[in-house]
Image (cartoon, rainbow, N blue to C red):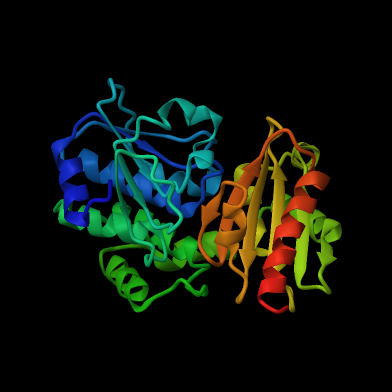
Amino acid sequence: MDITLKEAAQRLLDADHILILSHQSPDGDTLGCASALLRGLQSLGKKARFLCSDPVPRKFNYLFAGIEPQEFSTEFVVSVDIADRQLFGKGLAEYVDQVDLCLDHHGTNGDFAKERYVDAKAAAACEILFQVLKEMQVEISPEIADCLFTGISTDTGCFRYGNVTPRTHHMAAELIELGAHAADINREMFDTKSRTRVAVERYALQSMTFHFDGKCAVLFLPISMVEELSAEEGDLDGIAAMPRQIEGVLAGVTVREKPDGTLKVSLRTNQPLNAADICAVFGGGGHAAAAGCAFTGKSFEEVKAMLLGEIGKQMERCGL
């Protein structure tokens, strides 16, 4: 059931012993949401903790700095920035049908929760969390401001993507006024790379293939490469943006092999192609310019053929 922002805030105010869930392969937005909500709830005297199927990348550790772990019997479950059931990951599979409240900004949200507040116009889920926390009358500390700014900045490519709106800039400015360390965050997120990350990028560029007269680029990140380079989650974050950055590419496909054999697909598109429509065919979802899906029991070549087939169909419909 869809509810209003005010109702979503009230559900959190009425609840206690709250479990916050982020999506697998966590990025800055889902972690920014989780950490901001965690800090906000605990500041109100509530008990709250956070779970994710995958470890938090080291570069995002500052989001949770100083938060004391709390153990309790869960009474209320809230998911943040999770668009569909696939994104919970195997580590959170038991909670897929137990979500009381979903806070999300994906128009393709799978409606898995008892109640949800979805704002597809929000550039990042952290925009929604900012509004929810203010509705709850949580004092936005500099630490919470850092969490929210991180989510907004990372999900907009440092305010470069087409999902950015005037509201996005207004919120970012307000967060800076509240103490967010914008320059430090942006430098860490966008201007700092580990040597392992550079090695991953080198591998990605060398393995990339082009299709449809260069309008589509595909890269594959096998688990063998991840293990060989000892790459951590943070070393892989943002790789999906690389194919679309190449001149003439309208569809950038990144397929990553997970330790359990699952193939996780990240699709980035430029107009007139729609990433969400393509991924929806395979049970995934997202936004028009960025979406994802996952496959189990299939080889990379099989998945690549299926994706290229659907991308080709959309290109034909668009007259490309």
Identify which residue, 157 or 4, lies in the foreground.
4
Looking at the picture, does residue 274 appear above or below residue 128? below
The reply to whether residue 199 is visible in this rendering is: no
Is residue 289 among what the camera can see?
yes
Q: Quadrant of residue 203?
A: bottom right
Quadrant occupied by the C terminus: bottom right
Tell which of 43 and 152 is nearer to you. 152
Q: Position of 231 compared to 131: left or right?
A: right
Q: Is residue 283 above or below residue 73?
A: below
Q: Quadrant of residue 127?
A: bottom left
Tell me where residue 105 appears, x and y as whole percent: 39, 58
Q: Residue visible at 48% across and 67% down?
A: 156
Residue 172 location (% of width, % of height) = 34, 69
- Above or below for 90 versus 201: above
Q: Is residue 250 left or right of residue 72?
A: right
Q: What residue is at 19 percent from the left and 31 percent from the top?
A: 16
* Picture coordinates of residue 254, whole percent (x, y): 70, 55
319 relative to 202 in the view: left or right: left
